[in-house]
Amino acid sequence: MCTDSQINEYIAQLSDADKSVRNEAAIALSKCGRKAVFPMITLLDSKEWVIRYRAAEVLGLIGDETAIIHLTKLLTDEKDHVRYMAAKSLGYFKKKELALSLIRMLSDENEYVRRISAVSLGNIGGRTAYMALVKAAESETEERAKAAMTDAIARIEPAL
């Protein structure tokens, strides 16, 4: 278990100029478990998108359901990277009730957000996710996003 001092040190490293330091700090925070959940939720309001991004990542990796409502709010963040990570993290929970929030992300302006939303919906599964992915794939013009949607459809289909 991490101490408060360690958590604060890792949080400080989330602002480092070096991306690898920020990544290592996020991994370390995720290993702190529940003790890091509230500090990460607090960071979701940061003015720095990189901090919001990493906090969303940590919350997804920890998997504490307390974070779900906060991650769902990030799906409307102004920064596409943050929306991407919120969608990715929500997919880790594999909860069917999250499908509706992620379905609307299949029409996000950013291709990466659409792609990871498809992956997350594939993780969640269910008929609602399946039908939305089929519909989105029909109109998707970006090859990689379409491929992610097609893959998610193929992962869900056998379980229907």
Image: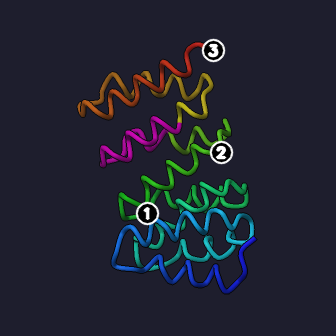
CA distance separating discs 2 and 1:
20 Å
Whichever of callouts 3 and 2 sits on the residue coming sooner in the sequence is 2
Q: Residue at 30% across / 26% down in the picture?
A: 139
Q: Residue at 43% across / 24% down in the picture?
A: 151
Q: Is residue 73 left or right of residue 47?
A: right
Whichever of callouts 2 and 1 sits on the residue coming sooner in the sequence is 1
Disc on res. 44: none
Extent of the magenta region: 103-120
Give the crowd class for mark 2: few <14, some 14-19, many >=20 residues within 10 Å. Answer: some
Q: Main secondary structure of the magenta part?
A: helix
| Image quadrant in which you'd find residue 101 | top right
Provide the secondary structure element on which disc 3 rests: loop
Q: Which residue is mark 1?
A: 77
Disc on res. 160: 3
Q: Which residue is mark 2?
A: 93
> Which sits in the foreground, 29 or 155?
29
> Which sits in the foreground, 88 or 129?
88
Give the crowd class for mark 3: few <14, some 14-19, many >=20 residues within 10 Å. Answer: few
The image shows residue 59 at horizontal and vertical percentages of: 61, 61
CA distance separating discs 1 and 3:
33 Å
Marks 3, 2: nearer the viewer: 2
Whichever of callouts 1 and 3 sits on the residue coming sooner in the sequence is 1
The image shows residue 45 at horizontal and vertical percentages of: 52, 76
Q: Are marks 2 and 1 in contact (CB under 8 Å)?
A: no
Mark 2 is on which residue type? Phe
Q: Is 34 in the magenta? A: no
Provide the secondary structure element on which disc 1 rests: loop
